Amino acid sequence: MKKIDGSEWKRLLPFLYRRKELNMFIIGDIENTSPDSKHLEIFLEGNFEHPDGILLRYYKFFVLADSDRTDFKEAAEIIRRYKRAMMLSGTVGGIDAISSHLSDLLKEEDTLHFAILKEPSLIEPIHKVRRATMKDALRLLAFLGSIEEFHATEEESFIDTLRDGSTRRYMIEDGSEIVATAASTSESSDMAMIIGVATRKDFRGRGLASAVVSRLCEDLLAEGKIPCLLYDNPEAGRIYNRLGFREIGKLKTLRFRKQ
Protein backbone atom coordinates (compact mmCIF):
# COMPACT_ATOMS: atom_id res chain seq x y z
CA MET A 1 0.00 0.00 0.00
CA LYS A 2 1.29 3.44 -0.95
CA LYS A 3 0.10 6.82 0.26
CA ILE A 4 -1.47 8.82 -2.55
CA ASP A 5 -1.43 12.58 -2.93
CA GLY A 6 -4.52 14.61 -2.04
CA SER A 7 -4.80 15.72 -5.66
CA GLU A 8 -5.45 12.08 -6.59
CA TRP A 9 -8.11 11.21 -3.99
CA LYS A 10 -11.05 11.89 -6.29
CA ARG A 11 -9.70 9.43 -8.85
CA LEU A 12 -11.00 6.72 -6.48
CA LEU A 13 -14.61 7.96 -6.53
CA PRO A 14 -15.83 6.09 -9.65
CA PHE A 15 -14.72 2.81 -8.07
CA LEU A 16 -16.05 3.68 -4.62
CA TYR A 17 -19.46 4.68 -5.98
CA ARG A 18 -19.99 1.15 -7.34
CA ARG A 19 -20.69 0.13 -3.74
CA LYS A 20 -21.50 3.57 -2.41
CA GLU A 21 -23.41 2.40 0.67
CA LEU A 22 -20.49 0.36 2.02
CA ASN A 23 -17.95 2.99 0.96
CA MET A 24 -19.84 6.07 2.14
CA PHE A 25 -17.37 6.89 4.93
CA ILE A 26 -14.53 7.11 2.42
CA ILE A 27 -16.63 8.91 -0.19
CA GLY A 28 -17.87 11.51 2.29
CA ASP A 29 -14.38 12.18 3.66
CA ILE A 30 -12.93 12.63 0.16
CA GLU A 31 -15.73 14.94 -0.97
CA ASN A 32 -15.61 17.09 2.17
CA THR A 33 -11.89 17.37 2.84
CA SER A 34 -9.38 19.74 1.28
CA PRO A 35 -6.64 17.91 -0.67
CA ASP A 36 -3.98 19.56 1.49
CA SER A 37 -5.56 18.54 4.80
CA LYS A 38 -3.25 17.01 7.39
CA HIS A 39 -6.17 15.10 8.91
CA LEU A 40 -6.83 12.81 5.93
CA GLU A 41 -4.53 10.22 4.39
CA ILE A 42 -5.36 7.54 1.83
CA PHE A 43 -3.26 4.48 1.10
CA LEU A 44 -3.85 2.56 -2.13
CA GLU A 45 -2.95 -0.98 -3.09
CA GLY A 46 -3.20 -1.67 -6.83
CA ASN A 47 -4.51 0.85 -9.34
CA PHE A 48 -7.16 3.57 -9.18
CA GLU A 49 -9.63 1.82 -11.47
CA HIS A 50 -9.60 -1.55 -9.68
CA PRO A 51 -7.91 -1.19 -6.27
CA ASP A 52 -6.82 -4.26 -4.37
CA GLY A 53 -7.32 -2.33 -1.15
CA ILE A 54 -7.90 1.18 0.19
CA LEU A 55 -7.09 2.35 3.71
CA LEU A 56 -8.21 5.81 4.81
CA ARG A 57 -7.22 7.71 7.94
CA TYR A 58 -9.43 10.58 9.07
CA TYR A 59 -8.06 12.09 12.28
CA LYS A 60 -7.60 9.01 14.51
CA PHE A 61 -10.15 6.85 12.69
CA PHE A 62 -9.33 4.35 9.94
CA VAL A 63 -11.62 2.85 7.27
CA LEU A 64 -10.73 -0.18 5.17
CA ALA A 65 -12.17 -1.01 1.74
CA ASP A 66 -10.90 -4.51 1.02
CA SER A 67 -10.91 -7.16 -1.69
CA ASP A 68 -9.73 -10.76 -1.88
CA ARG A 69 -6.33 -9.38 -2.98
CA THR A 70 -5.79 -6.98 -0.05
CA ASP A 71 -2.52 -7.28 1.86
CA PHE A 72 -4.04 -7.08 5.34
CA LYS A 73 -0.68 -7.39 7.10
CA GLU A 74 0.63 -4.30 5.31
CA ALA A 75 -2.57 -2.36 6.06
CA ALA A 76 -2.21 -3.31 9.72
CA GLU A 77 1.36 -2.00 9.76
CA ILE A 78 0.18 1.41 8.50
CA ILE A 79 -2.32 1.59 11.36
CA ARG A 80 0.31 0.46 13.84
CA ARG A 81 2.87 3.06 12.66
CA TYR A 82 0.37 5.88 13.17
CA LYS A 83 0.55 5.24 16.95
CA ARG A 84 -2.66 7.15 17.81
CA ALA A 85 -5.34 5.04 16.08
CA MET A 86 -8.64 4.88 17.95
CA MET A 87 -10.81 2.81 15.63
CA LEU A 88 -10.92 0.85 12.37
CA SER A 89 -14.12 0.06 10.48
CA GLY A 90 -14.90 -1.99 7.39
CA THR A 91 -16.70 -5.04 6.06
CA VAL A 92 -17.09 -8.03 8.36
CA GLY A 93 -14.78 -10.10 6.15
CA GLY A 94 -12.15 -7.40 5.91
CA ILE A 95 -12.06 -6.68 9.63
CA ASP A 96 -11.93 -10.38 10.44
CA ALA A 97 -8.97 -10.74 8.07
CA ILE A 98 -6.96 -7.84 9.51
CA SER A 99 -7.77 -8.32 13.19
CA SER A 100 -5.18 -11.06 13.75
CA HIS A 101 -2.47 -8.60 12.68
CA LEU A 102 -3.67 -6.05 15.26
CA SER A 103 -4.54 -8.35 18.15
CA ASP A 104 -2.00 -6.78 20.51
CA LEU A 105 -3.62 -3.35 20.05
CA LEU A 106 -7.22 -4.52 20.25
CA LYS A 107 -9.46 -3.17 22.99
CA GLU A 108 -12.84 -4.34 21.71
CA GLU A 109 -14.63 -5.51 18.59
CA ASP A 110 -18.21 -4.78 17.51
CA THR A 111 -20.49 -5.97 14.72
CA LEU A 112 -23.01 -3.28 13.72
CA HIS A 113 -26.24 -3.34 11.73
CA PHE A 114 -26.09 -1.01 8.72
CA ALA A 115 -29.47 0.51 7.82
CA ILE A 116 -30.74 2.97 5.21
CA LEU A 117 -33.87 5.14 5.33
CA LYS A 118 -35.92 3.34 2.68
CA GLU A 119 -39.52 3.91 3.79
CA PRO A 120 -39.59 7.26 5.64
CA SER A 121 -42.13 7.36 8.44
CA LEU A 122 -40.72 10.32 10.33
CA ILE A 123 -42.50 11.94 13.24
CA GLU A 124 -43.49 15.58 13.63
CA PRO A 125 -41.44 16.71 16.64
CA ILE A 126 -43.41 18.16 19.53
CA HIS A 127 -40.11 19.22 21.08
CA LYS A 128 -37.98 22.08 19.81
CA VAL A 129 -35.07 20.67 17.84
CA ARG A 130 -32.33 23.04 16.78
CA ARG A 131 -29.01 22.79 15.02
CA ALA A 132 -26.00 23.16 17.30
CA THR A 133 -23.44 25.95 16.86
CA MET A 134 -19.90 26.36 18.10
CA LYS A 135 -21.33 27.98 21.24
CA ASP A 136 -22.78 24.56 22.11
CA ALA A 137 -19.56 22.60 21.53
CA LEU A 138 -18.32 22.22 25.10
CA ARG A 139 -21.80 21.45 26.45
CA LEU A 140 -22.28 18.82 23.77
CA LEU A 141 -18.93 17.22 24.51
CA ALA A 142 -19.82 17.08 28.21
CA PHE A 143 -23.24 15.65 27.42
CA LEU A 144 -21.85 12.90 25.17
CA GLY A 145 -19.25 12.12 27.80
CA SER A 146 -22.03 11.55 30.32
CA ILE A 147 -23.73 8.85 28.21
CA GLU A 148 -22.48 5.60 29.67
CA GLU A 149 -23.11 3.57 26.51
CA PHE A 150 -20.89 5.86 24.44
CA HIS A 151 -17.20 5.54 23.72
CA ALA A 152 -14.92 8.49 24.36
CA THR A 153 -15.36 11.34 21.88
CA GLU A 154 -12.27 12.50 19.99
CA GLU A 155 -12.30 16.19 20.85
CA GLU A 156 -10.16 17.58 18.00
CA SER A 157 -12.27 16.08 15.22
CA PHE A 158 -15.48 16.93 17.09
CA ILE A 159 -14.58 20.63 17.30
CA ASP A 160 -13.12 20.88 13.78
CA THR A 161 -16.05 19.19 12.03
CA LEU A 162 -18.64 21.18 13.98
CA ARG A 163 -16.82 24.38 13.05
CA ASP A 164 -16.52 23.61 9.32
CA GLY A 165 -20.00 22.07 9.07
CA SER A 166 -18.87 18.68 7.79
CA THR A 167 -20.64 17.24 10.83
CA ARG A 168 -24.03 18.79 11.57
CA ARG A 169 -25.37 18.29 15.08
CA TYR A 170 -28.93 18.75 16.32
CA MET A 171 -30.15 18.85 19.89
CA ILE A 172 -33.13 19.12 22.22
CA GLU A 173 -32.87 21.07 25.46
CA ASP A 174 -34.79 21.14 28.71
CA GLY A 175 -34.16 24.64 29.97
CA SER A 176 -30.40 25.08 29.71
CA GLU A 177 -29.66 21.33 29.74
CA ILE A 178 -29.11 19.20 26.63
CA VAL A 179 -31.29 16.09 26.86
CA ALA A 180 -31.01 14.58 23.37
CA THR A 181 -28.81 14.89 20.31
CA ALA A 182 -28.02 13.35 16.92
CA ALA A 183 -25.56 14.21 14.18
CA SER A 184 -24.73 13.44 10.57
CA THR A 185 -21.28 12.96 9.11
CA SER A 186 -19.52 11.55 6.03
CA GLU A 187 -22.01 13.45 3.90
CA SER A 188 -21.57 12.83 0.19
CA SER A 189 -23.57 14.34 -2.64
CA ASP A 190 -26.42 11.87 -2.05
CA MET A 191 -25.88 10.08 1.29
CA ALA A 192 -25.16 10.89 4.94
CA MET A 193 -24.34 8.81 8.02
CA ILE A 194 -26.27 9.53 11.22
CA ILE A 195 -24.14 9.20 14.34
CA GLY A 196 -24.13 10.10 18.02
CA VAL A 197 -27.82 9.53 18.75
CA ALA A 198 -28.14 9.96 22.51
CA THR A 199 -30.78 10.75 25.12
CA ARG A 200 -30.15 11.58 28.76
CA LYS A 201 -31.08 8.58 30.88
CA ASP A 202 -33.87 10.27 32.84
CA PHE A 203 -35.48 11.56 29.62
CA ARG A 204 -35.63 8.25 27.78
CA GLY A 205 -38.92 6.75 26.66
CA ARG A 206 -40.37 10.13 25.66
CA GLY A 207 -39.64 9.95 21.93
CA LEU A 208 -36.76 12.43 22.01
CA ALA A 209 -34.43 10.24 19.95
CA SER A 210 -37.14 9.78 17.32
CA ALA A 211 -37.76 13.53 17.29
CA VAL A 212 -34.16 14.62 16.84
CA VAL A 213 -33.42 11.91 14.24
CA SER A 214 -36.61 12.79 12.34
CA ARG A 215 -35.65 16.46 12.13
CA LEU A 216 -32.15 15.57 10.99
CA CYS A 217 -33.50 13.16 8.36
CA GLU A 218 -35.97 15.73 7.07
CA ASP A 219 -33.18 18.22 6.47
CA LEU A 220 -30.99 15.63 4.78
CA LEU A 221 -33.82 14.42 2.53
CA ALA A 222 -34.61 18.02 1.56
CA GLU A 223 -31.03 18.25 0.27
CA GLY A 224 -31.35 15.01 -1.69
CA LYS A 225 -29.27 12.98 0.77
CA ILE A 226 -30.34 9.53 1.92
CA PRO A 227 -29.75 8.99 5.67
CA CYS A 228 -27.93 5.86 6.84
CA LEU A 229 -26.92 4.68 10.29
CA LEU A 230 -25.22 1.95 12.28
CA TYR A 231 -26.55 0.40 15.47
CA ASP A 232 -25.96 -2.56 17.76
CA ASN A 233 -28.73 -1.98 20.30
CA PRO A 234 -31.95 -3.94 19.55
CA GLU A 235 -34.11 -1.23 21.14
CA ALA A 236 -32.47 1.40 18.94
CA GLY A 237 -33.07 -0.88 15.99
CA ARG A 238 -36.80 -0.97 16.74
CA ILE A 239 -36.91 2.85 16.91
CA TYR A 240 -35.09 3.21 13.60
CA ASN A 241 -37.29 0.59 11.97
CA ARG A 242 -40.41 2.55 12.97
CA LEU A 243 -38.92 5.64 11.32
CA GLY A 244 -38.41 3.70 8.08
CA PHE A 245 -34.81 2.48 8.26
CA ARG A 246 -34.16 -0.98 6.81
CA GLU A 247 -31.05 -3.09 7.39
CA ILE A 248 -28.97 -3.79 4.27
CA GLY A 249 -25.96 -5.49 5.84
CA LYS A 250 -23.42 -5.40 8.64
CA LEU A 251 -20.13 -3.64 9.26
CA LYS A 252 -17.51 -4.30 11.88
CA THR A 253 -15.30 -2.07 14.03
CA LEU A 254 -12.15 -2.56 16.04
CA ARG A 255 -11.34 -0.17 18.86
CA PHE A 256 -7.75 0.13 19.99
CA ARG A 257 -6.16 0.70 23.33
CA LYS A 258 -3.86 3.70 23.72
CA GLN A 259 -0.33 2.95 22.52
Image (cartoon, rainbow, N blue to C red):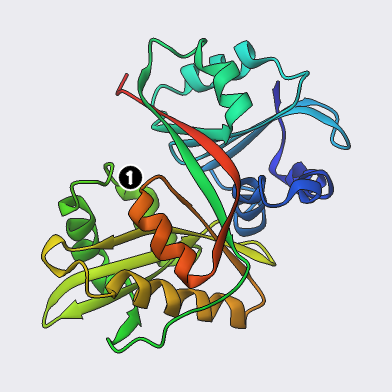
Q: Is residue 190 above or below residue 159?
A: below
Q: Report x, y in % for residue 14.
A: 84, 49
Inspect this view and state whether residue 167 appears.
no
Q: Report x, y in % for residue 137.
A: 26, 65
Question: Three-letter amino acid code at disc 1?
Answer: Glu
Residue at (67%, 57%) from the top-left corner?
31
Could you tell me which quadrant the C terminus lies in?
top left
- Using the image as rendered, state which of residue 52 and residue 9 is in the foreground: 52
Q: Is residue 145 above or below residue 192?
A: above
- Using the image as rendered, state which of residue 3 and residue 31 is in the foreground: 31
Label 1 sits on a secondary structure element that is loop
In this rendering, position of residue 201 left or right of residue 80 = left
Q: Is residue 213 above or below residue 104?
A: below
Q: Report x, y in % for residue 249.
A: 61, 44
Inspect this view and state whether residue 140 appears.
yes
In this rendering, position of residue 92 left or right of residue 4 = left
Residue at (40%, 88%) from the top-left corner?
124
- Pick out the residue farthest to the right: 49
